[in-house]
Image (cartoon, rainbow, N blue to C red):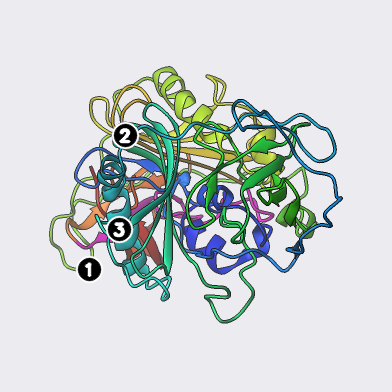
Amino acid sequence: MSTEIERLLAAAADDTDQPLTTDVDDLLVRARRSVRRTRIATVSTAVLTTGVIIAGVATWSANRNESTGPADSPRLTMDPTTGRVIKDETGDGVQTPPPVSQLSDANLRSQCKQADNEHVDFLRERGANSFDKGQPLGANWKVVVKAGAGNRVQAMFLSPDQSIVSTCTLMSVGQAQSYGRFSTKADVSGTKPSGAVANRVPDGVREVLVDLDGETEPRQALLGENGYYSLGFDASTSGRVRHVRGYDEQGRKTFEYTRPSLPTAATERPVPDSVTVKTAEPITPNVVLTKDPLTRKALAPPPPVSPLTDEQITTRCREVDDIYFSGRSSAQDPRIKAAGPVTKDWQVALKTGTGNKLTAVLISPDKKVYAWCHMLAPTAKGAYDYTRSAVQANGKFADDFSFGMVPDGVAQLVVDLPKQGPTRALISNGYYIWGLTGGNSDIQNVRVRGYDAQGKQVYTAKKDVDADFD
């Protein structure tokens, strides 16, 4: 789930805003991360995004070397007692691999199953990933690698026909921080090379070392079955994998991947630093609409304003914000990071919910970034959904299915929801929302109508919205 979900579809179908060659965690972070314990109990997100991943690939790019080195080539230095790699072929020290998770395969399948269900449902709703036949995660899916300690685990599952590999990163019991399904075949779209690294090395590789941006020593990966490997839950690898090396049983390098240097959206289509968000001038309606002007039937009321104070909201959302940045991508728009962590100085522009249930839009002090925060409990130990995004060159935020920006000249908005029917939107500080959005479980394309102060329709447009509220 910014590199998030509809955002997700854009990030999947249009790779102009992200380097094409990337690692699985980076693909996961391109979707908004979302974690839910309730009826849908899943992830995205990642971003969540949290996340539901639309782009699916599981092959190495052509920028690789699979030739076996000469017999006298430099080799790894191994600890004779533990068998662990302690130095690479250049003599540099090597960080220890993550432990094998002690959770059973059945336990991991059970914990990740709900995330898989929502992921498959989302793909089906959007008509995406035609290569994925939607076979649900079950007992016949093979756990090819599981890395981590306690309930913080990254697991990868291989489908019975070996056409799909899924990655599930659990942050606690039943709570998946991110989830994705990927094809094990190249160029699944048929239109462009996939070129993504899916945490897999060729047959014959016995040890895997991974170099990450910002680290001076390589990490030894935990190598599982079928060539799949993991750096575990705590390794924030999103967008940071620059070099992967594979070695045979004699410690000779037989495989090498180097990340190509590709431009990011920030370098291709820079937004002037002076651009800040511009919201519509607020208009007070002379008459509040209670009936649909088209049908004369009663409108559903707008969602309530959250009773939580702005400081309570920024404090709670800061927890999720920290998690968001723990999986940040190096390819992310630099303005998102430059905005800094959520503090009480962020404007709570929009807030809805009852009790501890919350959906809010927060605006950074520099007015260049928004944070969208959905929480069903007072802390990040409960279910949440979260994303950030930066302003576009036109001074507007990209269209989002979780909230909207009020069009100019509009005093009231009606959203034609499929279940509730025409619903008055809650408007605040130039933003609007139609319910307690979050989780992305039911995205619908609906009509949004805008009315001026006298109740005259001055705006109409179709919009994708999250139409399923907790």
Q: In the figure, 94 relative to 55: above or below?
A: above
Judged from the image, the secondary structure of the residue bearing numbered disc 1 is: loop
Q: Which of marks 2 and 1 is nearer the N terminus?
A: 1
Viewer can see residue 458? no
Provide residue 201's location: percent of width, then percent of height.
61, 57
| Residue at image point 53% right, 32% down | 98
Would residue 81 be found to the left or right of residue 311 on screen? right
- x, y percentage for residue 85? 68, 34
Secondary structure beneath dot 3 equals strand
Mark 3 and mark 2 in contact? Answer it, CB < 8 Å.
no
Q: Does the magenta stretch include residue 396?
A: yes
Mark 2 secondary-structure assignment: loop
Label 1 to label 3, Cα distance in Å?
A: 13 Å
Q: What separation in Å lies between label 2 and label 1 (alpha carbons)?
A: 38 Å
Amino acid of disc 1: Leu
Dot 3 or dot 2, earlier in sequence: 2
**Circles 1 and 3: CB atoms closer than 8 Å:** no
Over which residues does the magenta segment extend? 391-418
- Where, quadrant-wise, is the C terminus in this rendering? top left
Hey, what amino acid is under mark 3? Val
Question: In this figure, what is the number of numbered marks?
Answer: 3
Percent of width and height locating residue 126: 37, 69
Q: Is the magenta stretch mostly helix, strand or loop?
A: loop
| Residue designated by label 1 | 294
Residue 383's tag is 2
Q: In which quarter of the image is residue 447?
A: bottom left
Q: Name the residue under label 3.
A: 415
Q: CA separation, marks 3 and 2?
A: 26 Å
